[in-house]
Amino acid sequence: MIRFHFITNTTLKNRNRLKLFITENAKKERCHIESIDIIFCSDQFLLDINRRHLNHNFLTDIITFDLTHKSNKGKTAEIYISIDRVKENAQLFSFSFNQELHRVIFHGILHLCGYKDKKPGEVKMMRKMEDVWLDHYFR
């Protein structure tokens, strides 16, 4: 089950289609989704989470908390997305807001599927998979 929560107001169209797409593509990555809450929030809200839980004092567009227990049959997680960062990054990288929002959503799901982005090779693979998912979703 995937649920969307809006602490910061934003537009997210075709939510049922998006949920189905995420679920199907996660399965292709051998990642079963049990329960994921995607929370859309502000920079300040996410900065507070970053400080409290990760001891990081900087802005970020997304934080993914994998809450899966070993006894779970699938992934349980909370994904926090800063709408402020998504808007700014969309302008910075010349993408539409909608495209950048979906890139960030897919980024969080890909983390749950085992993709990392700490080393240069991991970043390259993460970007490739984001592009693949975006291409398939917006096709």
Image (tube, rainbow, N blue to C red):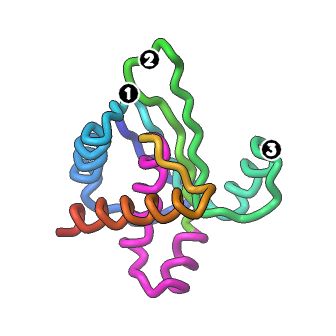
Task: Give how far apart the Cα atoms at labels 3 and 1 are.
Answer: 26 Å
Residue shown at 49% from the left, 46% from the top: 111
Q: Which mark identifies residue 34?
A: 1
**Quarter occupied by residue 82:** bottom right
Q: Position of residue 22 (x, y in %)?
A: 30, 47
Q: Earlier in the sequence, mark 3 or mark 2?
A: 3
The amino acid type of the residue labelled 3 equals: Arg
Q: Do the residues bearing badges 2 and 1 touch, measured as CB atoms within 8 Å?
A: yes
- Report whether 123 appears left or right of 73: right
Task: Give how far apart the Cα atoms at labels 3 and 2 are.
Answer: 26 Å
**Quarter occupied by residue 105:** bottom left
**Quarter occupied by residue 72:** top left
Does dot 1 land on a helix, a strand or a loop? strand
* Location of mark 2 (residue): 72
Residue shown at 37% from the left, 72% from the top: 99
Does dot 3 land on a helix, a strand or a loop? helix
Q: Position of residue 81 (x, y in %)?
A: 55, 57
User: Can you say whether 15 is above or below 134 in the image?
Assistant: above
The amino acid type of the residue labelled 1 equals: Glu
User: Can you say whether 68 is above or below 45 in the image?
Assistant: above
Q: Please say whether residue 121 is one of the residues in the magenta stretch.
A: no
Q: Quadrant of the N terminus?
A: top left
Does dot 2 land on a helix, a strand or a loop? loop
Q: Earlier in the sequence, mark 3 or mark 1?
A: 1
Q: Nearer the viewer, residue 63 or 12?
A: 63
* Location of mark 3 (residue): 52
Neighbor class of circle 2 (other Cα within 10 Å; few <14, some 14-19, many 20+) is few
